[in-house]
Image (spheres, helix red, strand yellow):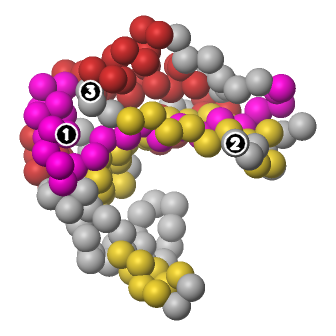
């Protein structure tokens, strides 16, 4: 694993659902959770963080389409100072408390081969080791049928 260099310490976690068979509008309606990002394949839309259209982007001469996606993030839920807190577990617990009331629906849809659930985490800090996630949090994440991805950036 290659550890990348970052400019400032930052921590956040996101939960995202992606896939060809995902309808982001259905998730908004059924969960009543307003996502920080939602897109249908091929839509051209703007998110709060990106001013240019996100649906179609050119990379290496190819047009890249954004997948169907529904995503919530601790970065948007915590206030600005809290997003600099290095305790990744705190961010994951916040998301789990938001999502667990809908766990049956999430598990049901993730069984479908056309939908993927993932906790995506970002951690950059002055430290010689990465974050620690206790088994109790990992069990709760696994109960939703979600994968766990972690980007680690060193500030040293």
- Where residue 143 is drawn, which disc sits there? none
Q: Residue 42 appears at what percent x and percent y? A: 27, 77
Up-down: is 19 above or below 14?
below
Find the residue positioned furthest to the bottom: 61
- Where residue 110 is drawn, which disc sits there? 1
The residue indicated by pointer 2 is: 1
Total marks in image = 3
Residue placed most toward the observer, 26 or 156: 156
Mark 3–mark 1 Cα distance, whole angstroms, equals 8 Å
Choose mark 1 or mark 2, whichever is in front.
Answer: 2
At 13% across and 45% down in the image, what residue appears? 112
Q: Residue 16 appears at what percent x and percent y? A: 35, 45
Q: Quadrant of the N terminus?
A: top right
Which comes sooner in the sequence, label 3 or label 1? 1
81 relative position to 69: left or right: right
Q: Of helix, strand and loop, which one carries label 2?
A: loop
Camera sees residue 37: yes
Camera sees residue 9: no
Q: Residue 17 appears at what percent x and percent y? A: 29, 47
At 29% across and 53% down in the image, what residue appears? 18
- Residues under numbered marks 3 and 1 in contact, where contact means CB atoms less than 8 Å apart: yes
The residue indicated by pointer 3 is: 144
Residue segment shown in magenta = 103-128
């Amino acid at each position: 694993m290659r550890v990348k260099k970052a400019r400032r310490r930052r921590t956040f976690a996101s939960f995202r659902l992606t896939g060809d068979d995902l309808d982001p509008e259905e998730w908004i309606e059924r969960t009543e959770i307003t996502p920080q990002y939602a897109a249908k394949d091929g839509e051209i839309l703007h998110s709060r963080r990106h001013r240019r259209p996100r649906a179609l982007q050119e990379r290496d001469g190819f047009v890249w389409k954004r997948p169907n996606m529904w995503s919530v993030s601790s970065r948007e839920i915590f206030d600005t100072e809290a997003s600099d807190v290095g305790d990744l577990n705190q961010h994951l617990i916040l998301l789990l408390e938001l999502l667990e009331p809908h766990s049956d629906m999430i598990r049901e849809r993730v069984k479908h081969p056309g939908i993927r659930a993932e906790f995506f985490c970002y951690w950059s800090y002055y430290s010689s080791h990465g974050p620690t996630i206790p088994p109790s949090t990992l069990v709760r994440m696994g109960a939703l049928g979600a994968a766990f991805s972690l980007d680690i950036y060193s500030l040293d």
